[in-house]
Structure formats: C-alpha cells, structure tokens
Amino acid sequence: MTNTFSYNHLFAFTESVFRSMGCPEEDATLATEVLLSADLRGIDSHGVARLVGYVRLWEAGRINATPRVGIVHETPSTAVVDGDGGLGLVVAPKAMAIALEKARLVGTGWVSVKNSNHFGIAGYHAMKALAHDMIGMAMTNASPLVAPTHSLDRLLGTNPIAVAIPAGDQPDFVADFATTTAANGKLEIAQRKQKPVPEGWVQNADGSGSTDANAVKNGGALLPLGGDTGSHKGYCLGSIVDIFSAVLSGANYGPWVPPFVAFLQPPADPVGQGLGHFFGAMRIDAFRPAAEFKAHMDNWISTFRNARAVEGQQVLIPGDPEREMAAVRLLDGIPLLDPVVKDLETVGAKFGLTL
C-alpha cells in the first residue's frame, strides 16, 4: 500500500528533520532539495526513504551536521575538497559549485572529494551544470556490496555515474546509472514489497545466482552491470568511479568504504577519510560555440528519438522517464510505501515532528 504526499509537505518535514539534527538552515534546505530530487524523478530508492539512514548515522556520530567544507589542494582547474564528515547531500553540491566556478574561469573544473557521506542521486549534481551551458559529471563510491567479476568478495559499491548535457529546444540529455545491474535501493524496495528480484541482480554467498531480495543481507553480493557475459564492463566502470572518487582524493576505497547502515561499524583499518566523490564541469564554449553545440544536440536527440522502435516499444533519450515523472509528481504528489511512511513517522517522533 502507498500514501501520497505533496512535494511541499515532504520538503517541509524533511527540512525540519535536518534542522533538528543541527544542520544550519541553509544546509538543511540544500540537503532536502537534493534528497527530494530523487523522489520527484522517480528514483524512490534514494529519496526520503533514505532519511532514516542519515538520522541513524548522525545518531551514531558518523555525520557532522555542521561541517566546514573546504579545499585542501587545488590548481586553476582542479581541487580536492574535504567534506569534514558532513552530509554528502551538502558536501557534494558545494564541491560541484567549485567545479563550476573553475570551469567558468578556465574552461573545465574537476573536483575530487574525501571525508563525505552518501550524496543522494548523482544526476542532481551533474545537472547543476546545465544552466551554465556546461556539461556536468558526477560520481561517487559507496558501501562495498558488489562482487567483482568471478569474485565471492564484496569489494565495490554501486558506484554511480551521471552525465548531464544541455540541449537547445529538446530536453537536456541526463544519464544517471549505477555500475551494477541494479542499485541496492532497488533491493530495498523489493524487500519492502516482499517480492523477488530479476535474475542477474544478485548472487548468493557461494556465488550462485539468486532472485532473493535478501541475498546480499545473507552474505551474497550485488552483480556488476553486464550480466553473465559482460559483467567485466560494469566491474571496470565501478573501479574507475572508485579510483576517481577515492584513490584520487584520499577517501576510503574498495572494502574500506564505510557502510551506509549505522548498525555496521566502519572498517577498523581505514585507508582514507569517509566516502569519496568526483565532479566535473566543462564549459561548452571551451570547445565550440554553445548555441552551435546545442543545435547539434537537438539534431542528435531528434535523430535517436525518431529511430525505428521494436514493436510495442519506444526509443527514449536518457533523462526522459525522470523528467516526465517529475512533472507528474509535482502535480499529483509523491507516493510512499507504507514501510517508508512508518519510518518517517518514527523519525519525526524523535524530534517532535508530525509527518
């Protein structure tokens, strides 16, 4: 069963929770905007369903509600940012803003982040470049739940990649995807619905395939993007994200990445600080005139959108489903599963708030 809430209602509630955690007003608003962008775009696994997780990490002393986010190393086009243990929902937008400013000044900006936490959906951060006639990139490493190809050990996270590219008259191109067959949040949704997951999403502890949504909880692992014959490609993509986000910045990588769940302790022998992210911004006119580029992007998008489709199917452009969902949910509200509503009510009760 689901309950539907307006965007404004959920925004006010979520913002109040972050403020109750001690976040400054500006940070609470920013964190709420990032978090709810997932619900609006139909990525329910990364929206308010995750709020309880952030609260529990804060209660465990693993999130700093008042971080001093700052640059610890930089060149004209690059920077390393220390998130001071803050909410990734706050650290990441501030780091992306640095990448955008560097791109404005010198054409491109690249920022690697350490000492952060889960940052919501990657697409939100990449899309910040669109209003500036820039191409945006965002990626992050995550809790080790993924077994590399032919492995039983969980060494990588779902490690998403997002790229946002502006167009002219056509909707912008926005690709946002995990480097696993499915994000862990989709397992959580299946668990709440008490349903199996498709083959190819997970493996059991012995490496055999499974459709059990609880397989990872029972010692199994998520599988890299690509399935039985191509998982080495997802393994490579996830590895690139881990290296750019963490080995480059000084964050924890591989099996040392702290778990998102508060009931599991971070590894006792960390190789870095917190989670890592990586952001990029490229000014289009550093390559060719922006208007000319966007006209050709319109042509590119139209060509692909009008490709002959398999019977009963439609050729989509990356970002189409999320954009259409956002329009619907802004008007009709955001549906939340009963278990999510109960979690939010419990979180609210901690702070004397009513959902």
Image (spheres, rainbow, N blue to C red):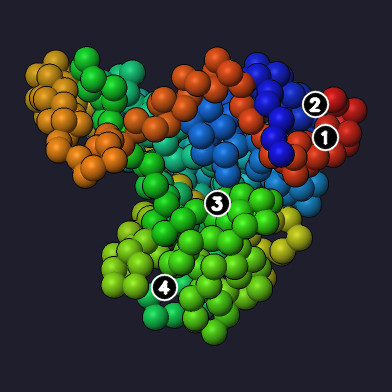
Taking the spot 14% from the left edge, 38% from the top edge, the residue there is 308
Residue 355: assigned label: 2
- Whole-Å distance between the Cαs marked 4 and 2? 41 Å
> Measuring 15% from the left and 36% from the top, which residue is drawn there?
307
Q: Are marks 1 and 4 in contact (CB under 8 Å)?
A: no
In what quadrant of the picture does the C terminus appear?
top right
- Tell me whether circle 2 and circle 1 mark residues in contact (CB < 8 Å): yes
Checking the image for residue 1, the label placed there is: none
Q: Earlier in the sequence, mark 2 or mark 1?
A: 1
**What residue did someone put label 1 on?**
345
Q: Nearer the viewer, mark 3 or mark 4?
A: 3
Q: Position of residue 124 (x, y in %)?
A: 45, 32
Q: Which is more N-terminal, label 4 or label 3?
A: 4
Which residue in the structure is indicated by mark 3? 186
Tell me if label 3 and label 4 are in contact, CB under 8 Å.
no
Instruction: Tell which of 253 and 350 is nearer to you.
Output: 350
Of callouts 4 and 2, the N-terminal one: 4
Instruction: Give the vertical position of 295 relative to 147 (above or below).
Output: above
For marks 1 and 4, give the CA distance. Answer: 38 Å
Q: Amino acid at mark 1?
A: Glu
Residue tagged 4:
148
The numbered mark, 3 or 1, whose residue comes first in the sequence reads: 3
Q: Position of residue 252 (x, y in %)?
A: 52, 61
Q: Nearer the viewer, residue 177 or 89?
A: 177
Q: CA distance from mark 2 to mark 1?
A: 6 Å
Q: CA distance from mark 2 to mark 3?
A: 24 Å
Residue at the front extreme of this rendering:
311
Picture quadrant where residue 99 is located: top left
For badge 4, the amino acid type reads: Pro
